[in-house]
Image: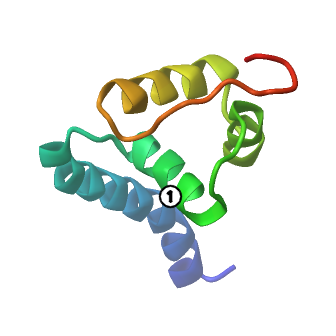
């Protein structure tokens, strides 16, 4: 790998952090986090989905998704429904 390619590979994670930080600033007036936006975007694209599907799609811990959904519900962004098959 050339020196230029190596510097580009090293710069990619930093660029990602910078984009995430900038997005966080844009979302702040809406009282949303980047993680919450990712869940809202998933729901917008796929429609109503289970918490399990969100966990599997995003690849994060169940507790993290649960907290994110609770905050989105509390702030009026989503409405949660019990699963008719298991009551959760």
Picture quadrant of residue 35: top left
Percent of width and height locating residue 41? 50, 58
- For the C terminus, the quadrant is top right
Q: Quadrant of residue 61?
A: top right
Asked whether 6 or 11 is in front, the reply is 11
Number of labels in the image equals 1
**Of 6 and 39, the residue lying toward us:** 39
Between 47 and 71, the one lying in front of the other is 47
Q: Quadrant of the N terminus?
A: bottom right
Which residue corresponds to the image point at 34% horizontal and 61% vertical from the top-left? 19
Residue at point 69%, 32% (across, down):
51
Vertical placement of 33 versus 82: above or below? below
Which residue position is annotated with label 1? 41
Image position of 38 (left or right of 82): left
Q: Position of residue 4 (x, y in %)?
A: 51, 83
- Residue ID at (46%, 22%): 70
Crowding at dot 1, Cα within 10 Å, few <14 / some 14-19 / many 20+, comes out as: few
Tell me: 43 left or right of 85: left
Residue 43, image x and y in percent? Answer: 57, 53
Placement of 18 over or under 71, stated as above or below: below
Position in image of residue 86 (x %, y %): 85, 19
Instruction: In this rendered view, identify the residue nearer to me: 45 or 4.
Output: 45
Q: Is residue 10 above or below residue 62?
A: below
Left or right: 86 in relation to 23? right
How is the rendered protein coloured?
Answer: rainbow
Picture residue at 29% right of the left edge, 41% below the top? 32
State the SS at label 1.
Answer: helix
């Amino acid at each position: 790998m050339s020196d230029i390619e190596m510097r580009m590979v090293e710069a990619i994670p930093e660029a990602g952090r910078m984009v995430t930080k900038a997005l966080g600033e844009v979302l702040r007036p809406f009282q949303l986090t980047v993680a919450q936006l990712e869940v809202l975007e998933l729901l917008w694209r796929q429609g109503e989905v289970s918490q399990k599907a969100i966990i599997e799609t995003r690849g994060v811990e169940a507790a993290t998704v649960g907290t994110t959904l609770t905050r989105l519900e509390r702030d009026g962004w989503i409405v949660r429904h019990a699963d008719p098959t298991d009551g959760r």
